[in-house]
Amino acid sequence: MILRFAQDFFIKIYALVPPTFEPMQRLPLELITDRIEEADAIVVGTRMASQLLDLLPRANAVRWIHALAAGVDPFPFDLLRRTDITITNSRGLYADALAEFVIAAMLWFAKDLRRISRNQDAQRWEPFTVERLEGQTAGIIGFGGIGRAAARRAEALGMRVMSARRRSELADPTADDVIAESDYVILAAPLTPSTRGLMSAARFARMKQTAVLINVSRGQLVDEDALVHALRSKQIKGAALDVFSAEPLPPEHSLWQLDSVLVSPHSADHTADSHDRAMTFFLENVGRFERGEALENVVDKDEEY
């Protein structure tokens, strides 16, 4: 039996019984909990990850847990490291959509689309000078699937691309150099203990005054208080954010009030087919699991990604 904890946008909780995946049956959490001893595998949506802490002590037969998202930072790794359970995730499935958001964000600032929209609403004809992306530098922090997809698109626009690509580079001067030289600093690294708070006040101080921060990774990579200070003091030009430390972003948060910020409600990867792609990949891994083959996208439990 495979017990699935899926995100609210799919079916919050449901179970399927092999050998065929017949119509999905929505089950209350209590029933899933009562039957967890039978499970060989669990699939988890981000919003339901907290349930693992309660379920794992009784999930004696579970050999595999799959995350429908790319990020697994909500998982209880202190507990999981003491088990032989294999963890997999959905990294790479959302890279193209997130990379397109990166390009859109760069164009939003380069062409001052906020100003254009406001002038149109006011029926104000006000010509002004815009920037070109060609010749500017895109600095990518984290060069996995999202980073590489963003790099391809940036290079197609004639941009210079720099990157800090290995885990060891994210906290050392390599990242500092990328941040200092970039016109657009793009965060595409996973959230791990070593990347939490990666964009600190010291690193905002290294950015160009004309530079923009773009975050399509996790909100916790950024010290948001330091970011607000950098924006208010004109230390940097702006920020385009699809992720935040607290989600939904609280109405009273300062980031809502700043004209130099593009706020996206963690939906840059929510395409019409994103959920189907995630489930298709999961089912392909189910086949590997049943055949005893190596699973795709295995997570390093020590690195937490």
Image: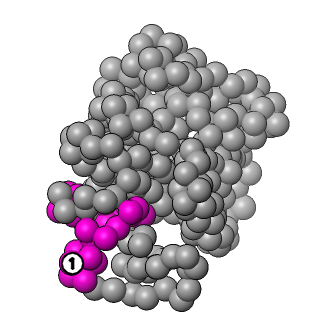
Determine which quarter of the picture holds residue 153: top right
Asked whether, in this view, residue 270 is left or right of residue 255, the answer is right
Q: Position of residue 228 (x, y in %)?
A: 33, 41
Question: At 22% from the left edge and 75% from the top edge, which residue is drawn?
Answer: 33
Tell me where residue 98 appears, x and y as whole percent. Answer: 60, 51
Q: Tag 1: residue type?
A: Asp
Based on the picture, tell me whether residue 37 belongs to the magenta stretch: yes
Q: Residue 246: x percent and y percent? A: 28, 55
Q: Does the magenta stretch include residue 40?
A: yes
Residue numbers of the magenta segment: 29-56
Q: Which colour scheme is used?
A: one colour
Q: Which residue is drawn at 25% across and 58% down?
A: 60
Q: Look at the picture and state if 305 lies above or below 241.
A: above
Residue with the most extreme top position: 173
Q: 122 or 76: nearer the eye? A: 76
- Which class describes the residues within 10 Å of circle 1: few (<14), some (14-19), or many (20+)? few
Q: Please tell me in which quadrant of the rendered image residue 221 appears.
A: top left
Which residue shows up at 59% across the image and 56% down it?
A: 291
Quadrant position of the N terminus in the picture:
bottom left
Q: Which of 93 and 283 is in front in this view?
A: 283
Main SS, magenta residues:
helix
Residue bearing the label numbered 1: 34
Residue 230 visible within the image? no
Would you identify the image quadrant in which residue 206 lies?
top left
Residue 294 vertical position relative to residue 35 in the rendered view, above or below = above
Q: What is the x, y in percent for residue 232?
A: 35, 39
Asked whether residue 97 is in view, the answer is yes
Residue depicted at x 75% and y 29%: 159
- Image position of 117 (left or right of 130): left
